[in-house]
Each structure stands twice: as structure tokens, then as C-alpha cells.
Image (cartoon, rainbow, N blue to C red):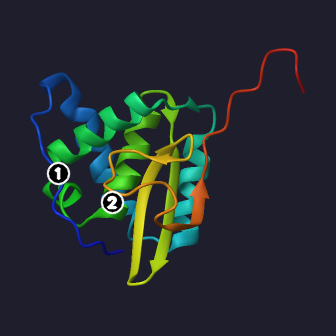
Amino acid sequence: MSQSMAPAARSPVPLRDRPAALAATGAARLLVLLRPRGIRRVLSFVRRGAAPATVEQALAARQAVVGVSARCAGEGCLQRSVATALLCRLRGVWPDWCTGVRTSPFRAHAWVEVAGRPVGEPHAAGYYHRLMIVAARPRRKAGRR
């Protein structure tokens, strides 16, 4: 996936948050080697039982991932988005993980969003046509089947 934009701003990650961010970026590095269908299957499985993420939670995860990984801060949108989703899951929540394209000029991209809005991205909702989504699912309420 490529995108022509400046690298994401990196800021220091607190020591207590680094191990989880490093684990998420390492796992994402391996996951992005899979075919798209495989990535979607793994993320769909991992998402189970997570509450929907808030914008603040997703943005904090994205900032931590970018803070510990130069690849995620740069052109590595696929790894950055997967790592962000995984870090959110480690924290008990899940954003919508998306991949998509635009046609003029052609660009492919991967990102996370909450309530239909890209988190930490320079483009507005709808800039990319979503092709693949692993959406957050609200937990079922007790007593409902």
C-alpha cells in the first residue's frame, strides 16, 4: 500500500507503554506478510470480545505505534494500521480496521477509523473507497440472544 504523505509525527512513548506497542508492531510486521484474506481472518478472530474503541483510544494506540516504529511512522500504512488495531485490542477495545483505494491518482491505503472517521489521518472520511473492513462489534448485552 502506498500513500504520498509526510511521515507521521513521532513523540516519546512512556516506558510503561512501550512493551505493548513494540509487541503490536512486531506482530503486525509478521501479519502484513499474509495475503489480504489471511490478514482479515486473523484480525476478525483477534477482534472477538473487544468493545468498540473511542477516537481517543484509537489515537493513543496509533501515536504509541508511530512512536516506537520508524516504519509505522513512515510509508508503512498497512503495518501501522494493523499494529494500531492490535494495540487497541491489547487494551480491550477495537477500532474499525480498513483498507481502500482512490482512483485519481491511484493510491491504496490502510487505516483505522471510529464512527466512520479516520483516526490520525490527514484525509477526511470518504477520501478512500473502503474495500476491506474488520469492524468493531458492540458486545451483546446480558440476557440477549
Separation of residues labelled 1 and 2 (CA atoms)? 10 Å
Toward the top, the furthest residue is 142
- The numbered dot on residue 110 is none
N-terminal label among 1 and 2: 1
The C terminus lies in quadrant: top right
Q: Position of residue 88 (x, y in %)?
A: 42, 36
The secondary element bearing badge 2 is classed as: helix
Q: Position of residue 40 (x, y in %)?
A: 57, 61
**In the displayed structure, would residue 37 be above or below residue 137?**
below
The residue at 52%/60% (across/down) is: 126
**In the displayed structure, would residue 83 be above or below residue 126?**
above
The secondary element bearing badge 1 is classed as: loop
The N terminus lies in quadrant: bottom left
Q: Position of residue 77 (x, y in %)?
A: 32, 62
Residue picked out by circle 1: 69
Q: Position of residue 142 (x, y in %)?
A: 80, 15
Q: Amino acid under label 1?
A: Ser
The residue at 43%/45% (across/down) is: 85
Q: Amino acid under label 2?
A: Gln
Q: Alpha-carbon neighbours of circle 2 within 10 Å: few (<14), some, or many (≥20)?
A: many
Quick check: marks 1 and 2 in contact, CB under 8 Å? yes
**In the displayed structure, would residue 62 be above or below residue 93?**
below
Looking at the rendering, which quadrant does residue 141 occupy? top right
Q: Nearer the viewer, residue 84 or 39?
A: 84
Residue picked out by circle 2: 79
Q: Nearer the viewer, residue 112 or 17?
A: 112
The residue at 16%/59% (across/down) is: 7
Toward the left, the furthest residue is 12
